[in-house]
Amino acid sequence: MKGLVYNGPRNVSVKEVPDAKIERPTDVLVKITSTNICGSDLHMYEGRTGVETGKVLGHENLGQVVEVGKAVDRIKRGDWVCMPFNISCGFCKNCEQGYTGSCLITNPGKAGAAYGYAEMGPYNGGQAEYLRVPYGDFNCLKLPDDAQEKETDYVMLADIFPTGWHATELAGVQPGDSVVIYGAGPVGLMAAYSAIIKGASKTMVIDRHPDRLRLAEQIGAIPIDDSKGSAADHVMEITAGEGADKGCECVGYQAHDPQGHERPNMTMNELVRTVRPTGGIGVVGVFVPQDPKAPDELSKRGGMAFDWGLFWSKAQRIGTGQAHVKAYNRQLRNLIHTGRAKPSFIVSHKLPLREAPQAYQHFDAREDGWTKVVLRPAA
Amino acid sequence: MKGLVYNGPRNVSVKEVPDAKIERPTDVLVKITSTNICGSDLHMYEGRTGVETGKVLGHENLGQVVEVGKAVDRIKRGDWVCMPFNISCGFCKNCEQGYTGSCLITNPGKAGAAYGYAEMGPYNGGQAEYLRVPYGDFNCLKLPDDAQEKETDYVMLADIFPTGWHATELAGVQPGDSVVIYGAGPVGLMAAYSAIIKGASKTMVIDRHPDRLRLAEQIGAIPIDDSKGSAADHVMEITAGEGADKGCECVGYQAHDPQGHERPNMTMNELVRTVRPTGGIGVVGVFVPQDPKAPDELSKRGGMAFDWGLFWSKAQRIGTGQAHVKAYNRQLRNLIHTGRAKPSFIVSHKLPLREAPQAYQHFDAREDGWTKVVLRPAA
Amino acid sequence: MKGLVYNGPRNVSVKEVPDAKIERPTDVLVKITSTNICGSDLHMYEGRTGVETGKVLGHENLGQVVEVGKAVDRIKRGDWVCMPFNISCGFCKNCEQGYTGSCLITNPGKAGAAYGYAEMGPYNGGQAEYLRVPYGDFNCLKLPDDAQEKETDYVMLADIFPTGWHATELAGVQPGDSVVIYGAGPVGLMAAYSAIIKGASKTMVIDRHPDRLRLAEQIGAIPIDDSKGSAADHVMEITAGEGADKGCECVGYQAHDPQGHERPNMTMNELVRTVRPTGGIGVVGVFVPQDPKAPDELSKRGGMAFDWGLFWSKAQRIGTGQAHVKAYNRQLRNLIHTGRAKPSFIVSHKLPLREAPQAYQHFDAREDGWTKVVLRPAA
Amino acid sequence: MKGLVYNGPRNVSVKEVPDAKIERPTDVLVKITSTNICGSDLHMYEGRTGVETGKVLGHENLGQVVEVGKAVDRIKRGDWVCMPFNISCGFCKNCEQGYTGSCLITNPGKAGAAYGYAEMGPYNGGQAEYLRVPYGDFNCLKLPDDAQEKETDYVMLADIFPTGWHATELAGVQPGDSVVIYGAGPVGLMAAYSAIIKGASKTMVIDRHPDRLRLAEQIGAIPIDDSKGSAADHVMEITAGEGADKGCECVGYQAHDPQGHERPNMTMNELVRTVRPTGGIGVVGVFVPQDPKAPDELSKRGGMAFDWGLFWSKAQRIGTGQAHVKAYNRQLRNLIHTGRAKPSFIVSHKLPLREAPQAYQHFDAREDGWTKVVLRPAA
């Protein structure tokens, strides 16, 4: 089959790779019809991770079931399904508590596995014609009748919609809250969208790319351009000097200031400053324990010069980590199905798999208008 | 009346000060019979805060009501009462949500007020004969018939028992959990005691003072002496390589390593290492936004070199800040009343007020056996 | 001053009554500009309660502060304020836990007080020119600059918006849920509106009055007319045989079937049937411990023939009781202020106080188009 | 193999039955070494259910794994395991939310399956030599090294310890609470034990069997004998007229008054009376939707004359249903392992399987001293 393979820094190509197939009786085999390029794919693309060459990338996958293993009871051939990016067993200590993003079985020795991802197990991704889904009964979300009609919405259930939602859960967003979100990339926009769906009263989104800020405004958020002055001052003004009730970090370890310098602690220290005393902060932007190519010594070993004293004296809370997609994907699927959510507003490009390499290039360059790419391997 | 006054670094004395009295119709006036010296008093004593000279210290207070203002409805003359160290109004946005430690009314411009404390409003403390209690109906916890008999237990409701409890709440301790606690000072021991009352299965306490470790063992915790080898390794061994389910920081910004060097990030980075993926960490040790006498530049401006990448990749959560005492003091009072809790096990000394200066000296030196001092102004 | 007085069953009139005034230093005196007639006023109006004659009715009140007691710190003369229908102290065991609808101080011997209400303390209501507000700092919600412009929205914060919200809280409504609501009176419509604001995926509302069902549809709910066939069957069909995730009871003890017979257990037994296994049910419709004029013996003594076996075997949960308005009114005020909520859609009539008696008559008859009346005493 | 078979009302016998065996690749086969007789077995024994004749009973099972299916990854031959009485899939809507007692897959058309139980699927029980465990990776709780030494403690994890715990969870028991528990049978005693482990300040247990009341007292609860006067009056006195903070129902539909008359609504109406306003009530005693042999018409169709008006006006909450054992069994196992819990205090008899019929007879007669029977099929 064909798959998008990582060859090295800023070098990916579509190649023939061994066919995905049923390997265990609990596996499900899915023909992929939509698979997104994710912002976190760019960490790998840019060579800022230890991902092995030859790996098929792609962890935001949707398609139709073509085969099921002998122990699969719920999922049937022909079902339309969307897979959480996390691969989880369903029966370890973490999965049992709903922490499926930190599964202890599927990536032994670490907590958490994913398709086509650095450090997250030996699994190939879904930017390919077929995908093997381990523990298929647990890891496939069944889609309703309108699966194909709303495919571009449903594919967002694999990662960015639940991840944005997770940011707001970690932050503890409640109806009526004011919320500040750092980053208007796909995840930041989904966090804003989630806050709005949950009934936030004010949702502020900070970024500097005009196309992203336009999308933020379009869904009802307040866009704040941090290249045009202090974003923090702006937030304090909008919240009458109090700070936002809750905050979300949706940028991660490669944060840059408006002048283009990498400053890994910028978003977190701004959040501590712009969130009110007793407020909560959810951090879904990716951070890593080692980052040999980081700009400074502290960052290289995964550290951050964090404004801890202010954080503590404001009695704030922080929750972190990758989304436990299964905690949210049924409910979010229902919102899409009944027309209450339409996360495809984020999509700028739908392309055949063969155009994936160029898409990586444009998306990595944050070219204007390249907000989110959906690849269509079956098209 | 007589009160213990801060004169400057490591200089306190008992002096005549103006009588505490009813100033507002919502005030209550209490004759103090027990008032503790707190570990956080030592930050002031050592000159590591901006506390003004002339201030009466003391925020852990218990006594008998001698007078009530005209608008006081619930509290009566003669009632035995224990006051949370936080002074709160009961009707601001934070108090309404139960965040009485971050009251927006009693210390305008900041969040949170306290008796006799740096940066926490103009209130004198209770290491004195009398104490004025603002918003008395809200801030006095009434004690039952055995108030005098169990006075040394009940006075722990002012701060350290609820503060230790808060650490376990912020960490999210559940029955059956394993818990690691950094610091076996009064607050750390109360955190351990709280975890045990809540049904933790294993409670590990890390310190190096033999008297404190003995008390930890006595209440059923596992004492770990970090001057005898790596405490972190020990925790990992006890938890079969997994890390503790939850962790508590009960040391604060003046943490020292076993060799006596001040290392403000030591406890937090150890907690990130020794708490399991998806685990929670509660931080009640005091940290400050500015610390001009800190050992390094980052700490001087309230920053910390924190192992953020590991923290994030373990999907951990952190809650911080001073305890909201009223969230717990009724329930903890009931546990004392029915004999299920006896926090006075911590007390090493009961002394008359006039001996307070010497007591500060001994306690500040962490002399063996000086675990907790109760002053008795009326004795 | 003038006030609407209860003279006996179906007999109310606007009369001269003693002026409301500051009686305690914690009181606030409010000039009432908007005060609603509530569905629960009709229980009193119809003589189905023990309310004393001569009482001024009215518990949904908004106005401007004209005087404050000497112990009032937060509220100032000139403030625009909306008062929760519950009168609460802020410092009893229930208030401290946020159960301000069950205050133990303001109505001694019972739990919970209200303005102008049967069995809920000696307080006059606000269908009058002025209202005395006890514990004013605690019981007044301050309104922002647009108080007068959006007065008809903000007055809904006194009762029905928080009460509808409370129904969804008691039921445990989460984003993505399907919700079934019995009753499309003002509270039922507010419950539907609340579910929608919180991100419910499907909100079904059962009633038989065309004007109410039209409003339900207008806000995005699915109206179900139970005079046109089995509502329960309809709900099961919409939910693919599963039942709704959550349910709300917004009718109360005077429920009638479509044929007009009073059947107090109808709504609850239908809810048990139409809510899914493990689902939650919130009950804010009023029920009473004694009801001498009830149609059967069991109901007379406050009992109900409830389908307990089915309820238990479905592992459902029920939460009940009057709303704790202060738990929600700040957040809901923010939603109104930022334009995210506009509960005034419910209002059918704005009338001067002198027309109150006729308004009671029309509203009690459930005349088409009389969905909600706002009285304007100052107009 | 040998198994205890239901032949009809009050008629069970140990017979040769077809061997339990691996039927699906996800199955695990367990050699049973401990299997309890449960109070809910008596509903079947007495002929008060529709259980089919020929069924092997027994849903509280522990033993050693002798074989695993090809799709089983976590559980290995030789593992000591305890099985929740619920049989659940791990991947349906209810299981995903932790409601494993209401699994939608294992008993199609209903919610929830169990071993050897009326209306809960076609599964044989474990009062036999071997047991087939469906979805073995999900349904087997692995036991530590001390499995055999503490076998009589660990077998309580199958049902009554988690069920008692569930009662306190449904009631919302918090540290410091006062709790009233109706019924001191095995589940009631486990509810009391759970409340105490969680830090309740007062735990009152109501029953009339002296052996049970003695056990209640032995674990630190306050025993109340309802054959010696009004239990409700006693509870109100102990709680200073306020009522208990929380309550638990651990009796179920065959409740009798002290005079021996069956009164299905007795315990619930007493709970409403003796629990304080805003309090929570957890109901784990079994109730059924149809009960043809009930003493009155309402009960026959699963109804109850419930004091709804008082319940509502006290703003109480009720949670019901069978325990979701997997929500608690890991944590409770840890408490047993570290010696913090020892639920075997309940056990009065350990008997070989062949004595099961007589044991049913004695236990059904509630003979003094027959509090809990553990059968040992392998002995």
Image (cartoon, coloured by chain):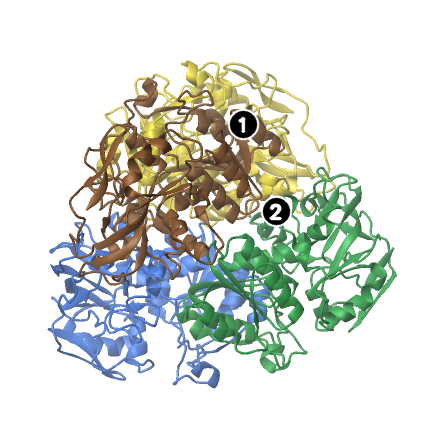
Chain colours: A brown, B yellow, C green, D blue
Dot 2 falls on a residue whose secondary structure is helix
Count of numbered badges drawn on the protein: 2
Quadrant occupied by the N terminus of chain C? bottom right
Label 1 amino acid?
Answer: Ala
Indicate the quadrant where residue C350 lies.
bottom right
Q: Nearer the viewer, residue C249 or C49?
A: C249
In the rendered structure, the answer to whether residue B81 lies left or right of residue D370 reads: right
Observer able to see residue A204: yes
Numbered tag placed on residue D350 in the rendering: none
In the rendered structure, the answer to whether residue A312 lies left or right of residue C208 reads: left
Q: Residues within 10 Å of mark 1 (few under 14, many from 20)?
A: many
Q: Residues within 10 Å of mark 2 (few under 14, many from 20)?
A: many
The residue wearing badge 2 is C335
Dot 1 falls on a residue whose secondary structure is helix
Vertical side of A375 occupied by C173: above or below: below
In the rendered structure, the answer to whether residue A152 lies left or right of residue A86 reads: right
Label 2 amino acid?
Answer: Leu
- Picture residue at 78% right of the left edge, 50% below the top: C132
- Picture residue at 52% right of the left edge, 26% below the top: A226
Residue C246: give x, y in percent of width and height. Answer: 48, 62
The mark lying in front, picked from 1 and 2, is 1
Could you tell me which chain the residue with mark 1 belongs to?
Answer: A
Could you tell me which chain the residue with mark 2 belongs to?
Answer: C
CA distance separating discs 1 and 2: 24 Å
Numbered tag placed on residue A231 in the rendering: 1
Vertical side of D25 occupied by B291: above or below: above
Residue A225: give x, y in percent of width and height. Answer: 53, 29
User: Is there CB contact under 8 Å for labels 1 and 2?
Assistant: no
Q: Nearer the viewer, residue B276 or B67?
A: B276
